[in-house]
Image: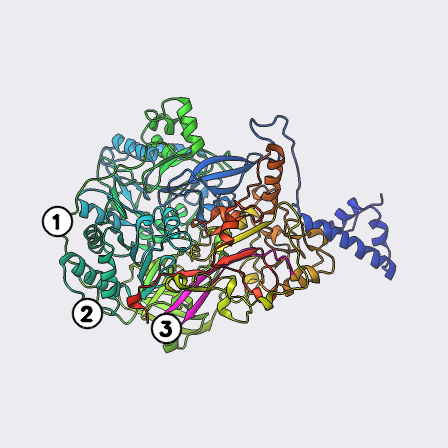
């Protein structure tokens, strides 16, 4: 072969693969040679469309297969996803020993087989390249031996036995971690354990203890609720046990399958619980407290409702009329006295033992009382803290006062999964292993315990919190598995019991005991809320980044927020009236002041938000989150401690805010046909008033009909009564199907790649609209308009009704996308998959990774269908398939299966009188149908 000297590196690589290129490149190009090279480029493009590959592709064959691992067959292990201390049971799917997907554990009482978006995105967290790879000392790399020496010095803190030693953690439900903290406190009398969460529930905890005279956990059962009032509630989206609550709520919302409940909601800004209500009322936080005070006067003191909003009397009467089946729930952003009043009202409504009950709390309770962060900061500022252990918390980012006091601590150690703000500010940073890499345990909100078993060897090394604490206590260093087994040696004494608990993902008999404590006899009256202010600032956790811990997760950064549909940032949410009065439009930049503190960020107009309220989302503006999350959005945590009036001043500049709202607009003869909805009263009169009977038969007539020819015909039904817009299905689809992230700039160009989206629709006025969610994915039309326009047959139909994509045929004309009335196809304008910051081993090997120039869309998880077909042929059983979105959905809004099977759940769903097809006038005959949404309003409030 001729010498390659002087030829660029990329061309040398191609010449090594195709030696005849050497001669072609050495001569001036004429027309014939140009056409030959173009043909070669097209051939290479076809290969790239199937698999973009990796730059340094090297494989090492396993000499001996691991026990139980069969190439191509998944292994599944039970564990738990832990957020703010509480566990939700999960099942982790492995391929050849590497975790690739998370599903819910059907046997776990808090997940019931579902997951939230945080659990789905944990795969990204596990493979995050920005995780800590070694310890730091004063921000510089250090050896593990140096860390060991520093921690040994901590055992002898000057100033007495344990004096000056503090431990800071979040909420702890883990018995193993709690026992390790207790061991440290026992070894160092005088040491103090401080508990703090950036997004905490201290008022809820304090109120329950005051109301029942001891620490308690109040857990509702929405299956038993006929009438509920949710006041600024987080019951369906983030409260402990929210997956179970969402399942129970949805089970009472479709009149075809049983009696409907009724939900009233009162809130200052739209929330997932509020927009699911039959009646949604809007008020400022002060207005919400006023309503609770008037409710308490009526329900606790038998006073007739007077004053307040005009709907209050009807709500009070409805609650009283359903005594024993009525519930009031209050979100965590209100004071303890207000929560105590809610507990008293629920007791007065007679719901205990039915719609709610009182249990022992799941949190670990040490022998000595826990202290909080304010006490710790007071001691730090006064020089009383000489050594501080910070375990998986980030107060330097979230509390400016803490950041200022930390340099006064002589020895500070941060145990964190990445070199974040607190880890860099501490004297020592010890890497924390991921939850997939270590043994542990945690409890659900109802107390049920799960043993967390490692899913893989540590990718970067590190330590567990329990091991670090035991070492600091002077104990002999033992493996994490031994620490966990020691805690559970009495309940799981035999190896058989231990393995059974690991396999089930639940330790039997560990649910919290029910409390018989009575409510306090004299409940204080709720004081009226603060008087009306010119402007009220609500600082709430970002629904996807939470307190900021997920800022480096690209799946969650690019996941559209449920209401604003914004991504890659946290604009200030302002009500329509304020935007009009100030002349603000979406993207206009403002300076937000709280006293002397200031933040600069764009605004976004939020319909349905209380007048005079602006909402800032916490968790953005990180400066040490990682390459993905650094510098995204504005940091609003400093405003939490601001003292003074809230002001907004326009800067006169405008910012491009990435938003997906109008990127896929459906055009219908009647827009109301897209999301059909009605009332329960009308349904009882005419059950089919929203279903296919409403459609014009002439508009769906066709000369051609494609009946399913195969024994199996796949279809899907989506219940709009159950969908709460939580976005878990979108994240599950992204994880299952290797859907790439494109980044802020490409989203601004309308190039996001999600196969499944959740459309959010408004109806009514900007000030108080009705809100509807609708999952939208490829409809797998029997008369698919995309198929007839593809010039190369890349999109085609199979005998089972699937609309397929042959990636190697696609030449990127995008005709199919232009001709799709549902706008659910996505085009790879660039090699988005190659540009992602994730290792190839993190992808699902059963799904092709698409390259540049290829169209892609929902496949009904065809890889799962293939697996089910193989299992059916092998075992002689029926094909049972659950798509990724269906498996993740906490409310079971999505049902998938064989519509030819008379016993299939999807067949029964499609037989509902509420079933309809979106854009039926197009004559596409989609395999995806919807059940229309029914509301159950109070006739006394209907106008």
Disc nearer the start of the sequence (1/3)? 1
Indicate the quadrant where residue 638 lies.
Answer: bottom left
Looking at this view, is 396 or 222 the one in front? 222
Looking at this view, is 68 or 16 the one in front? 68
Q: Position of residue 691 (x, y in %)?
A: 49, 61
Report crowding for label 1: few under 14, some 14 to 19, many 20 or more residues within 10 A (C-alpha): few
Disc 2 + disc 1, Cβ < 8 Å = no
Report the disc number at residue 154: none
Dot 2: what SS? Answer: loop
Report the disc number at residue 521: 1
Instruction: Say whether residue 764 is magenta.
Output: yes
Region of the chain picked out in magenta, as a range: 755-784
The count of marks equals 3
Q: Is residue 368 visible?
A: yes
Dot 3: what SS? Answer: strand
Q: Position of residue 784 (x, y in %)?
A: 64, 59
Disc nearer the start of the sequence (2/1)? 2
Residue wearing tag 3: 649
Residue wearing tag 2: 307
In 3D space, how far apart are the residues under numbered discs 2 and 1 (Cα atoms)? 27 Å
Residue 658 as seen in the image, left or right of residue 189 = right
Give the residue furthest to the left. 522
In 3D space, how far apart are the residues under numbered discs 1 and 3 (Cα atoms)? 49 Å
Report crowding for label 3: few under 14, some 14 to 19, many 20 or more residues within 10 A (C-alpha): few
Q: Position of residue 940 (x, y in %)?
A: 28, 67
Give the residue furthest to the top. 494
- Quarter of the rendering occupied by the C terminus: bottom left
- Quarter of the rendering occupied by the N terminus: top right
Residue 453 as seen in the image, left or right of residue 492 = right
Q: Is residue 351 above or below residue 361?
A: below
């Amino acid at each position: 072969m001729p010498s390659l000297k002087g030829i660029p590196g990329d061309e040398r690589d191609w010449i090594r693969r195709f030696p005849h290129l050497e001669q072609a490149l050495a001569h001036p190009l004429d027309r014939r040679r140009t056409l030959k090279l173009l043909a070669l480029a097209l051939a290479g493009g076809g290969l790239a469309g199937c698999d973009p590959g990796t730059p340094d592709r090297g494989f090492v064959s396993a000499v001996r297969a691991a026990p139980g691992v069969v190439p191509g067959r998944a292994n599944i292990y039970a564990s738990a996803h832990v957020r703010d201390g509480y566990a939700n049971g999960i099942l982790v799917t492995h391929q050849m020993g590497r975790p690739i997907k998370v599903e819910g554990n059907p046997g776990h009482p808090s997940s019931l087989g579902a997951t939230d978006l945080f659990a789905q995105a944990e795969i990204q967290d596990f493979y995050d390249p920005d995780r800590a790879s070694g310890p730091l000392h004063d921000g510089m790399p250090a050896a593990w031996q140096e860390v060991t020496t520093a921690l040994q010095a901590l055992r002898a803190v000057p100033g007495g036995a344990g004096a000056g030693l503090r431990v800071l953690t979040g909420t702890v439900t883990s018995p193993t971690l709690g026992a390790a903290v207790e061991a440290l406190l026992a070894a160092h009398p005088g040491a103090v354990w401080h508990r703090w969460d950036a997004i905490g529930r201290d008022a809820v905890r304090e109120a329950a203890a005051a109301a029942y005279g001891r620490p308690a956990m109040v857990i509702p059962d929405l299956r038993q609720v006929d009438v509920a009032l949710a006041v600024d509630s987080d019951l369906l989206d983030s409260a402990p046990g929210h997956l179970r609550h969402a399942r129970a709520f949805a089970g009472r919302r479709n009149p075809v399958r049983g009696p409907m409940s009724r939900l009233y909601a009162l809130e200052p800004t739209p929330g997932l619980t509020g927009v699911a209500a039959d009646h949604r009322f809007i008020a400022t936080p002060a207005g919400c407290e006023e309503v609770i005070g008037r409710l308490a006067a009526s329900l606790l003191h038998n006073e007739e409702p007077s004053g307040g909003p005009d709907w209050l009397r009807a709500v009070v009467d409805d609650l009283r009329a359903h005594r024993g089946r009525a519930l009031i729930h209050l979100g965590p952003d209100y004071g303890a006295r207000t929560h105590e009043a809610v507990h008293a009202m629920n007791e007065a409504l007679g719901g205990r033992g039915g719609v709610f009950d009182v249990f022992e709390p799941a949190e670990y309770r040490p022998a000595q009382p826990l202290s909080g962060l304010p006490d710790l900061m007071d001691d730090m500022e006064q020089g009383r803290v000489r050594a501080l252990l910070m375990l998986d918390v980030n107060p330097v980012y979230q509390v400016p006062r803490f950041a200022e006091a930390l340099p006064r601590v002589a020895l500070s150690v941060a145990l964190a999964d990445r070199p974040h703000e607190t880890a860099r500010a501490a004297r020592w940073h010890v890497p924390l292993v991921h939850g997939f890499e270590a043994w542990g345990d945690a409890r659900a909100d109802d107390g049920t315990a799960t043993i967390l078993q490692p899913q893989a060897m540590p990718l970067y090394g590190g330590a567990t919190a329990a091991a670090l604490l035991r070492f600091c206590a002077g104990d002999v260093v033992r493996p994490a598995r031994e620490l966990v087994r020691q805690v559970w040696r009495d309940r799981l004494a035999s190896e058989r019991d231990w393995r059974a608990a690991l396999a089930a993902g639940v330790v039997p008999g560990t649910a919290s005991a029910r409390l018989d404590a009575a409510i306090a006899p004299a409940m204080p009256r709720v004081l009226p809320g603060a008087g009306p202010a010119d402007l009220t600032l609500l600082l709430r956790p970002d629904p996807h980044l939470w307190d900021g811990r997920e800022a480096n997760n690209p799946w969650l950064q690019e996941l559209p927020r449920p209401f604003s549909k914004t991504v890659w940032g946290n604009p200030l949410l302002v009500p329509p009236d304020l935007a009009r009065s100030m002349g603000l439009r979406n993207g206009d930049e403002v300076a937000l002041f709280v006293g002397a503190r200031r933040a600069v960020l764009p605004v976004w107009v939020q319909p349905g938000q209380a007048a005079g309220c602006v909402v800032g989302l916490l968790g953005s503006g990180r400066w040490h989150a990682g390459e993905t999350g650094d510098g995204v959005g504005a940091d609003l945590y400093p405003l939490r401690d601001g003292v003074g009036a809230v002001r907004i001043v326009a800067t006169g500049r405008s910012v491009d805010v990435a938003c997906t709202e109008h990127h896929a607009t459906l055009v219908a003869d009647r827009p109301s046909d897209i999301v059909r909805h009605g009332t329960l009263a009308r349904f009882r009169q005419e059950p089919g008033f929203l279903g296919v009977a409403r459609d014009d038969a002439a508009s769906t007539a066709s000369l051609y009909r494609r009946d399913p020819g195969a024994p199996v015909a796949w279809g899907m039904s989506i219940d709009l009564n159950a969908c709460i817009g939580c976005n878990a299905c979108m994240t599950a689809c992204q994880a299952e199907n290797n859907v790439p992230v494109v980044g802020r700039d490409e989203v601004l160009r309308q190039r996001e790649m999600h196969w499944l989206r959740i459309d959010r629709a408004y109806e009514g006025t900007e000030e108080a609209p009705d809100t509807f969610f609708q999952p939208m994915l490829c409809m797998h039309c029997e008369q698919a308009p995309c198929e007839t326009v593809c010039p190369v047959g890349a999109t085609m139909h199979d005998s089972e009704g699937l609309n397929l994509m042959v990636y190697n045929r696609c030449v990127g004309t995008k005709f199919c996308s232009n001709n799709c009335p549902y706008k659910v196809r996505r085009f790879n304008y660039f090699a988005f998959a190659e540009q992602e910051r994730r290792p190839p081993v993190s992808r699902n090997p059963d799904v092709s990774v698409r390259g540049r120039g290829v169209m892609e869309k929902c496949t009904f998880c065809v890889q799962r269908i293939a697996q089910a077909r193989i299992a059916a042929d092998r075992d002689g059983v029926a094909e049972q398939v659950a798509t990724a979105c269906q498996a993740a959905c906490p409310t079971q809004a999505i049902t998938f299966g064989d519509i030819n099977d008379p016993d299939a759940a999807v067949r029964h769903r499609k037989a509902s009188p509420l079933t309809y097809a979106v854009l039926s006038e197009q004559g596409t005959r989609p395999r995806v149908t919807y059940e229309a949404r029914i509301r159950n309003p109070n006739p006394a409030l209907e106008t």
